[in-house]
Image (cartoon, grey):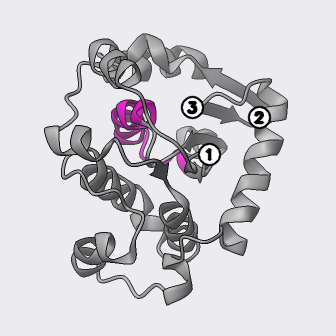
Amino acid sequence: MKNAFMSSCQLFFIYDTHCPWSYAATPLVDAIIQAFPEMELNLLHCAYYDGSANIGVKTTEQVEEVSGITLADAYHQQRKIAADSTISANLMAWVDHKLEEQSFEILKALQALHFQQGLSLNSAEDFDSLIKDFKLSAPNKVFSSDKLSKDAEAIFADIGELQEVIGTQSIPALLLAVDEELVLLNHNYYLKDPQAIVEAIKLELN
């Protein structure tokens, strides 16, 4: 009965690889899928950052204070470059179709490149180590920063439908779907204690 029940549960993570709040929320996703390995994980890159805006120091300071994570000096140095997650969105959309079982590990690796190594991830060369480590064979068009791929645009459309249901466009967003019910998890309460969100989900499932 447990297996049949859990197979009907899904977790949706709406994020942007260049969003520091998304980076802070990723450990929550990690804790959830470790606690509920049969729960289906849906990673949805919203491609919020398109190269038109910088991430301010007040935002990063707040993220570090609220979550307890530390953003590397290398990240703060490149933060002056306008954030552009187009290539990352294209890559994660390709991964979702071709290597879904590795998608979360690849997401975490991308975040490490950006927030710990300070790579802007807006040129193909920034992904060289990732391609080598995961032996990726993504086509060259995935690494175009000019526009979103068709797959990435399809994910963007899916996100729009979910945001209409939950009534917010804020990112990141963690959504728990159980059968026909969709619950927006208030991840802000748990950023310093990922295990606490696991306990909250247990209560929700019960």
Amino acid identity at mark 3: Leu
Q: Tell us which disc is closer to us: 1 or 2.
A: 2
- Where residue 152 appears, as percent x and y from the top left, is 66, 65
* Closer to the eye: label 3 or 2: 2
Residue 104 falls in image quadrant:
bottom left
Q: Earlier in the sequence, mark 1 or mark 2?
A: 1
Give coordinates of residue 135: x percent, y percent: 29, 83
Q: Residue at x 30, y 51 (%)?
A: 114
Residue 25 vs 143, above or below: the answer is above
Asked whether residue 206 appears in the rendered view, the answer is no
- On the rendered structure, is 110 left or right of 94? left
In the image, which disc is placed on residue 4?
A: 1
Q: Give SS at disc 2.
A: helix
Q: Which residue is found at the position 18% from the left and 52% from the top?
A: 117
Secondary structure beneath disc 1? helix
Q: Give the mark, 3 or 2, whose residue is nearer the N terminus.
A: 2
Task: Residue 154: give x, y in percent of width and height.
Answer: 75, 63
Q: Quadrant of the C terminus?
A: top right
Give, as a single range, the part of the protein colored magenta: 20-41
Magenta: main secondary structure equals: helix
Q: Which residue is mark 3?
A: 174
Question: Which amino acid, mark 2?
Answer: Gln
What's the distance in space between the residues labelled 1 and 2, CA to CA?
A: 28 Å
34 in magenta? yes
Does the magenta-highlighted stretch encompass residue 154? Answer: no
**Viewer-side residue, 169 vs 62:** 62
State the residue position of label 2: 163
Question: Which amino acid does the dot numbered 1 rest on?
Answer: Ala
What number is the disc on residue 166? none
Q: Using a 10 Å C-alpha cutoff, classify the residue at mark 3 as few (fewer than 14 neighbours), some (14 to 19) or many (20 or more).
A: many
The answer to whether any part of residue 161 appears in the image is yes
